[in-house]
Amino acid sequence: MTPAISTTGLRKSFGGQVVLDGVDLEVSPGTVFALLGPNGAGKTTTVHILSTLLRPDAGSAYVAGHDVVREAKAVRAAIGVTGQFSAVDSLMSGEENLRLVADLRHLPRREGRARVAALLERFDLVEAARKPLATYSGGMRRRLDLAMTLISRPQIVFLDEPTTGLDPRSRAEMWSIVRELVAEGTTILLTTQYLDEADELADRIAVLDHGTLVADGTPAELKRLVPGGRIRLEFEDERAMDAAAAAFAEATRDDRALAIDVPSDGGFGSLRAVMERLDRHRIEARTLSIHTPDLDDVFFALTGRAAAETPEEVAR
């Protein structure tokens, strides 16, 4: 199967600063691929190259099977781009914004009007269609922005920070829309500052740092790169906790919670070994829970920075 997006040895510099240093990516059709990284890591530069807004200095990039340099027009016909900031015209209504994009995409008049009506319905904007954008909430603006991107039915959609500034309900609505698009066969390349969003939506995640790809895999594969998994056992009384602590010399105690934490790789084998040792020592735990590293742990381990301290890049 031809990848929806692929890059080999992608390089880009601005002046003397190397922004991308030999990046290799491969995105399968009909999936969500999340691109993560600290400020200045090269995420937005990568998106700009893939969407033909920038030319790479070296390497190759293909989108929908087309070379982004030699076949830029074909690439642009296959993609849709929703930027970090809303691209709607605030002086126009939602319906007028959509009709303008349909005209710019050279859709026949009847087809364009039908497409606009369908998108207004799909994104729950029918009642607000003819209202000025000043009356729209942040979530409504983001839905309209994505609707504008979908006018031409792109095969591949670049979503740059699609839920920044949205309330939890609007974020959940956007997540639902992304899942629907993928179910229909659309490929999504997502950049986000919310690691829970990448964990929730992405089939694969790539982490960039200083222009270099430092990790690429499924969320589960990335989490296995980082130690720190544990099985937490809680007990009814201090006597049972003391017995468990003696049986699990490698565990750490939490006397206040009457609990111990046993190091674990998160696999079934580790869980079975813990259960067998409890049974062998005739120790009964009140509760058992499995804790694995999350993407915040992965991000910190790979980049040396917490994601919350690294807002997404805007200018680069």
Image: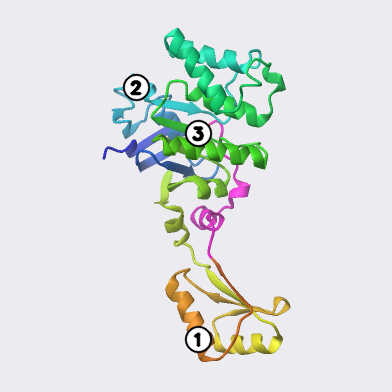
Give the x, y percent position of residue 31: 40, 41
Q: Which residues are magenta?
A: 292-315
The answer for how far apart the CA atoms under marks 3 and 1 are is 48 Å
Instruction: Look at label 3 and name its amino acid.
Output: Leu
As drawn, the label of residue 159 is 3
User: What amino acid is at disc 1?
Assistant: Arg
Task: Give how far across and how far down residue 266 sits, in percent.
Answer: 48, 68
Q: Position of residue 64 (x, y in %)?
A: 32, 30
Amino acid residing under circle 2: Ala
Q: Residues within 10 Å of mark 1 (few under 14, many from 20)?
A: some
Q: Mark 1 near mark 2, Cβ–Cβ under 8 Å?
A: no
Report the Cα–Cα distance between label 3 and label 2: 19 Å
Mark 2 crowdedness (10 Å alpha carbons): few <14, some 14-19, many ≥20: some
SS at mark 2? helix
Q: In the structure shown, which secondary structural element does the residue marked by tag 1 occupy?
A: helix
Give the residue at mark 2. 72
Above or below, comparing residue 293 to residue 169 in the picture: below
Identify the disc placed on residue 277: 1
Up the image or down, 281 lies above or below 196; here it is: below
